[in-house]
Amino acid sequence: IKHGSSTATNYSTVNIGRGLQSDCRMAALRLETCHIACSANRTPNVVSWGRGGTIAFGTCHSIALYDPQERRVLSMLNGHTARVNAVQWVHKEDGGEFVQKKCTYQSVQCKGHTGAVCAVDALYAGASILVASAAADSSVRLWLCGDANEAVCLHSLTFGSGFVMDVSLALLPSTKVPVLACGGDDSRVHLFVQSQEKVILLPPYHLDFNVSARACVCAGGELLLASCSQDCLIRVWRLRAKSGHGAHSEGDRDDGVIKMKEDVFGVEEQDEERVFAVALETVLAGHENWVYGLHWQPPSYKGGERQENLSLLSASMDKTMILWTPDQASGVWTEQVRVGEVGGNTLGFYGCQMSPNACVILAHAFHGALHMWRKDGEWRPGVALSGHFNAVQDLSWDPEGEFVISVSSDQTTRLFMPWRTEPAGRPRPTWHEVARPQIHGYDMQCLAALGRFRFVSGADEKVLRVFQAPRNFVENFANISGMSREELLASGATVSFVSFLKGGEKFSGVSDQYQESYFHPINMTEPPPEDHLLQNTLWPEVQKLYGHGFEMFCLASDSGGTVVASACKASKAEHASVLLWSASTWRQLQALPCPALTVTQMAFSPDAAMLLPLYFDNSYLLAVGLECGRIIVYGWRPGGDRAGGQDWIRYGETDPSQSHTLAIKRLRWRPRAGRAGVPEERAWLQLASAGADHAVKIFDINTEAL
């Protein structure tokens, strides 16, 4: 069954993608994607949960297809050249599911907008796809995409100096006539019917910008439309077919019953005029800040028949999601479930989605994090994908090859590792973010690992900072990885937050600390949710290094973690020097003058023990990252001069779905043979890459296939 998604970007183009049945894992089996760490873009309509179970969301210039059951990104759709602003699955009315694991993708571009596209929606119109798009050029366009892989613009609706914040497409009850709902910045919901050049404006009940408008078909063939706004309220509208054929019918008669005022309009279909009425159904008040996202519970199918489930999910900047349902007896809408975060200094939720079976709900936040709750008797936080929301500048493997640490322009340092789980059907562990050791006030630039649980980092400041893992992290690391706790504690990570010194003064008690900064040791057996990552996984800063005159640019450490080399941005030769630091005393050992200005990259020569895992059959592998985001792997075998280049062989490269969409910042080989979290496999190597597209990717390379 064909299935599709529509996406919108910052460069005035809408892409319509279709999945076709074929094998899409890799162009070559020598290079496999092990993990992709990424986050959702900072826009309200960028996440969509398909009825086949796959979550599609925009991340930088790409679209990630995430399987919440396998807890990994299945594929990346690359093709846009600007930020992806909106993503929407296109569903068939028969409830057919799309099998995602074996597919390739085709795309059709809808070009015509002159401003950034901010919202899209689509539905099947026979064998074609009808797409609606709203853009910053104050227009809404309707496109028809047929099997010829061409998109034709049917209509262009202009709104003068106003803007449309969201669009929603549906079919009028008991007809095949599409109706388009547009939430505008004029506090109105605009309704357009395709069959005639007529616009229906609902009364301006909202008191501020309309942000979202979502439609669904309810029982009895009626259509419900939900709209939310920055006035913190949600309004539900009911659109129904009237039994009369005039503009005024039974709904307008005074029968002594108080009714909401209806807006009546007629539509011609197959030479027959149908009359419809729109009225306000209810107003939902429960959020305390702007409401940005709405999502109706997807329909279910029993015996081939479609069954609607009236539940509405809302997300707000007050950091909460609310599930609303009507009472079966009275029809009054009430709040059933409220989940979210309490406290903290982060902003709220931009959007929300509900799984096909309504047992999982998902929100994406201002900083790109995905928040998931699962219904297991009660609603409990679930494990979701996480990653950086800005360019990743540097990364480093743990010397034992068990985890990866990365730094980004999003001002965070993040630690990713494999999670060894027992459920059957999962042949190897999945990777997750288990700690956020550093949250800074400056953009991070560089990183160097000093042993297993210590690292030094540099940001857009003149100071280097050294961090060491607390005992609580090591204990949780052992729980999640399945490694021996005693063995890990013996490696030297025994710093506790209680004994951490700040400014030379020891905290005498809890009362000496700000309440917001309390550290709560927790015992974790699975990757933590976002709120724990922000508060309870920080590492204490044990040292500051002063000596540079400008912002830090690059770092390096020797294989033993005893010497650190640092360099900063330099506009004069006097600042263009490399400083060497002792990792035991943290004293400056030497300043190495450089003839050039800014030193962009440094590397210590590894010893034989560190080089050994990168060999196989006395061969060498060289990974080259390109500015376009591709990675090329070369190999060398004995028999000639390495410097001559005759024996260097190009083994392969990443295909478009595996590659980064922007320049590659760092490439790092795992310092041991095999795959992290998997029993000894000498035939495999792992390569980690960081890119300006906000993504950290880990690749598996099978050396037996080379």
Image (cartoon, helix red, strand yellow):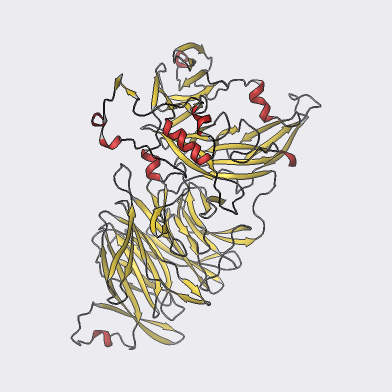
Is residue 433 placed above or below 557 in the rendered structure?
A: below
Q: Which of 182 and 305 lies nearest the eye of the viewer?
A: 305
Q: Residue furthest front?
A: 486
- Percent across and percent down for residue 164 are 36, 60
- Percent across and percent down for residue 572 are 45, 16
- Percent across and percent down for residue 534 are 38, 40
Q: Residue at x 38, y 57 (%)?
A: 379
Q: Residue at x 35, y 70 (%)?
A: 225
In the figure, residue 390 lies in which quadrant? top left
- Percent across and percent down for residue 429 are 57, 45
Placement of the N terminus among the 4 image quadrants: bottom right
Relative horizontal placement of residue 210, taking residue 368 as reference (left or right): left
Q: Residue furthest left?
A: 256
Q: Residue furthest right?
A: 639
Query: How many numbered discs?
Result: 0
Is residue 583 placed above or below 280 in the rendered structure?
A: above
Q: Which of 687 and 243 lies nearest the eye of the viewer?
A: 687
Q: Is residue 462 visible?
A: no
Placement of the C terminus among the 4 image quadrants: top right
In the figure, residue 633 lies in which quadrant? top right
Q: Is residue 427 visible?
A: yes
Is residue 592 placed above or below 398 in the rendered structure?
A: above
Is residue 383 placed above or below 539 in the rendered structure?
A: below
